[in-house]
Image: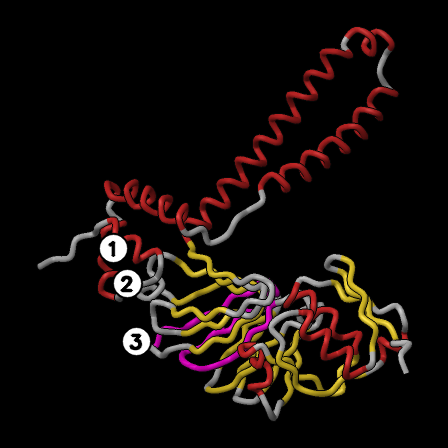
């Protein structure tokens, strides 16, 4: 008996709970123009019940409006100096109305464009994300496992991912355990840092954050593509090798005796080896959304060694306070470290 595409089946598909056979059935069904509208109706209903993310459009619109007004004031101020007296007095009200209408039209276009981009990504990709301090493991339709570190996200194509290509987009940090498929289709992790990781079946960690982007290979073999589009370079890694990228996108390769240390965050463990306290600022910002400040250069140069298990920033700060004899002062999401006055 042939499977039927129902609302319940589509909801399971959106949640990533369907079998490869069901995925193929749904993707073929969705290619028929008469079915697309119903597909998106159910998708919108499912996304409304189980939102993958919430975009703050009002805040973005307010920032854009303020910028438009500042530019408008600057431009009109320059123009008024060059206006004839008759034009300045006779068309002031009309000019004001025209400027307001122009600004309203520009804002409407920006909002429409942003809405189209968000809608396009929402329809083409399923987004998995984590909050600060959260770790999440996702099983993809091809059987690969992805463990997302805190404050990270993964975009996975909704259509044809398992059958056509295996390409995902990572923001933040994640560990990948990629399943090899019979037809040897490659699995590609794309990042906004300008490098891609191409594999067949292996385990590796990708850090695509703003600071210290890197790739660590635990098992198998991967190929890195990096550099500009006109000067794309290739680098092949072996287990235990670590590649870091500088601000210009240049790669440096090295060895690590303990590659699994780079995925210790999966168990909320933090490993330090003579690590300066000043180097912990990106960790607190990326993992917990906390700004770490150290005004005292002596404290900034102090180092910490050890392994700490901490699910919250308060737990990790408590360890640092005791281990390095520090004073911790918090104001909102800003934490300041200084030397303790206690004996």
- 267 or 241: which is nearer to us? 267
Q: CA distance from mark 1 to mark 3?
A: 27 Å
Segment colored magenta: 184-208
Whether residue 102 sits left or right of residue 75 in the image: it is left
Is residue 23 shown in magenta? no
Q: Main secondary structure of the magenta part?
A: strand
Quarter of the rendering occupied by the N terminus: bottom left
Which residue is tagged 2?
A: 18
Q: Which mark is residue 225?
A: none
Q: Disc 2, disc 1: CB below 8 Å?
A: yes
Q: State the image coordinates of residue 292 (x, y, percent, origin top left).
A: 77, 66
Location of residue 335 (image quadrant): bottom right
Residue at image x 33%, y 66%?
162
Of the image marks 1 and 3, the number of the one nearer the N terminus = 1
Q: CA distance from mark 2 to mark 3?
A: 21 Å
Q: Please tell me whether residue 98 is drawn above or below residue 247 in the rendered image.
A: above
Which residue is tagged 1?
A: 9
Whether residue 213 sits left or right of residue 234 in the image: it is right
- 32 or 57: which is nearer to us? 57
Of the image marks 2 and 3, the number of the one nearer the N terminus = 2
Location of residue 60 (image quadrant): top right
Which SS class for mark 3? loop
Q: Furthest residue to the front? A: 343
Q: State the image coordinates of residue 313 (x, y, percent, origin top left).
A: 67, 69
């Amino acid at each position: 008996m042939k499977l039927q595409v129902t609302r319940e089946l589509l909801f399971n598909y959106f949640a990533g709970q369907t079998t490869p056979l069901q995925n193929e059935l749904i993707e073929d069904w969705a290619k028929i123009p008469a079915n697309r509208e119903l597909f998106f109706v159910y998708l919108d209903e499912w996304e409304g019940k189980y939102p993958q993310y919430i975009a703050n459009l009002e805040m973005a619109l307010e920032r854009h409006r303020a910028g438009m007004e500042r530019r408008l004031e600057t431009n009109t101020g320059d123009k008024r100096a060059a206006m004839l007296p008759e034009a300045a007095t006779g068309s002031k009200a009309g000019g004001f109305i025209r400027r307001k209408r122009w600004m309203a039209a520009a804002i409407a276009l920006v909002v429409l464009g942003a809405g189209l981009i968000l809608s396009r990504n929402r329809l083409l990709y399923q987004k998995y994300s984590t909050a600060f301090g959260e770790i999440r493991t996702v099983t993809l339709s091809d059987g690969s496992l992805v463990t997302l570190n805190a404050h990270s996200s993964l975009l996975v194509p909704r259509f044809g991912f398992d059958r056509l290509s295996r390409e995902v987009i990572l923001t933040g940090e994640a560990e990948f355990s990629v399943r090899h498929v019979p037809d040897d289709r490659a699995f590609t992790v794309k990042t906004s840092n300008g490098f891609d990781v191409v594999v067949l079946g292996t385990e590796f960690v990708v850090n695509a954050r703003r600071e210290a982007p890197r790739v660590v290979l635990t098992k198998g073999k991967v190929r890195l593509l990096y550099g500009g589009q006109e000067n794309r370079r290739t680098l092949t890694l072996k287990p235990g090798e670590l590649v870091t990228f500088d601000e210009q996108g240049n790669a440096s390769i090295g060895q690590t005796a303990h590659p699994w240390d780079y995925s210790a965050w999966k168990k909320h463990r933090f490993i330090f080896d003579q690590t300066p306290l000043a180097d912990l600022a990106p960790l607190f910002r990326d993992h917990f959304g906390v700004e770490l400040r150290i005004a005292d250069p002596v404290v900034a140069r102090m180092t910490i060694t050890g392994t700490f298990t901490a699910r919250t920033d308060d737990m990790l700060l408590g360890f640092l306070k005791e281990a390095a004899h520090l004073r911790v002062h918090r104001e909102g999401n800003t934490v300041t470290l200084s030397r303790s006055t206690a004996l």
